[in-house]
Amino acid sequence: MAESSKPILYSYFRSSCSWRVRIALALKNIDYETVAINLTKDGGQQFSGEFQALNPMKQVPALKIDGITIGQSLAIIEYLEETRPTPRLLPWDPKKRAQVRMVSDLIASGIQPLQEPCHGEALDTRERGLGVHPHLPCLCWSHRLPDCRGLWGSLRRWPEKMVTSLPTRGPDGRKELAGSRNLSVLKQVGQENQLTWAQQAITSGFNALEQILQSTAGRYCVGDEVSMADLCLAPQVANADRFKVDLTPYPTISRINKSLLALEAFHVSHPCRQPDTPPELRA
Ligand SMILES: N[C@@H](CCC(=O)N[C@@H](CS)C(=O)NCC(=O)O)C(=O)O
């Protein structure tokens, strides 16, 4: 991995946690290099020894900056805030700052980790010439982001016996998704319930979030200034879209998301416009 004096962001174009950090870097006008960590290629590049040395959690994002490497998107954003405070992403007012952290944590701890319970090793079945077991139809869905034509499912590792040599495309020609090998989660969730699980995790979190935002929001999540909470919101709404969650019951979330997506920093950092975005998914 390249040495550089510029900060280096280890990122995956479609990772919502990476997107949070990309927005912060864009807002704060910090020049950086991207090192793409493909979560689906080569069995998941996050599992390489080289990347594990950087982030033992085997997750993106990680940011190499000022002689240290930081994992965890919110820790990265807070470090950027403390070292490069303009523009401010945490309000001065302690009450507003607490609200920003409340919304950020609600999304980063209360929704995102639950929606994809199976953070297992990834597998690109196309590369391996393998397909998806017919008993896993619920694991096949398209990944749709607001202004993308279509982002297809990340292909996760499944025990070999669950993977057959069926075609990797569904009847509509779309790529299909294989699941995680995390058997403990499977026992609890059940293969056929995985999409429902994700939808319930998001819906439950959004029910709370909508109620909270009704009292904290102005133009954005907390008042009229973009904050760390907004950096969490837009990528999470993209996840909700990807998991086909109906956003009609969430007018405040939808309104704020619309305002955020119109901002340059959210636009340039969008999954459709990253160095590692595949050509067919670029917008
Ligand atoms: N709490 C972490 C979560 C990071 C995370 O879940 N990253 C996902 C992508 S959004 C990942 O790298 N997953 C790898 C895997 O599931 O194997 C953060 O906020 O940075």
Image (spheres, rainbow, N blue to C red):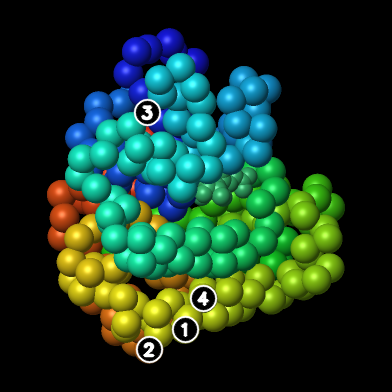
Image depth: mark 4 or mark 3 in front: 4
Q: Badge 4, how many Cα within 10 Å: few under 14, some, many 20+?
A: some
User: Which of pointers 3 and 1 lies earlier in the amino acid sequence?
Assistant: 3
Dot 3: few (<14), some (14–19), or many (≥20) neighbours within 10 Å?
some
Disc ID at residue 229: none
The answer for how far apart the CA atoms under marks 1 and 2 are is: 8 Å
The dot on residue 249 is 2
Q: Is residue 170 above or below residue 126?
A: below
Mark 4, residue position: 205
Q: Which mark is residue 34?
A: 3
The answer to whether the residue labelled 3 contacts the one labelled 1, judged by CB atoms less than 8 Å apart, is no
Q: Earlier in the sequence, mark 4 or mark 3?
A: 3
Which residue is at a point 18% across and 71% down the rendered structure image?
A: 219
Please say if the residues under marks 1 and 2 sit with CB atoms less than 8 Å apart: yes
Query: How many other residues sit within 10 Å of disc 1, few (<14), some (14-19) or many (≥20)?
Result: few
Kind of residue at disc 2: Pro
Query: In screen coordinates, is 183 left or right of 123?
Result: right
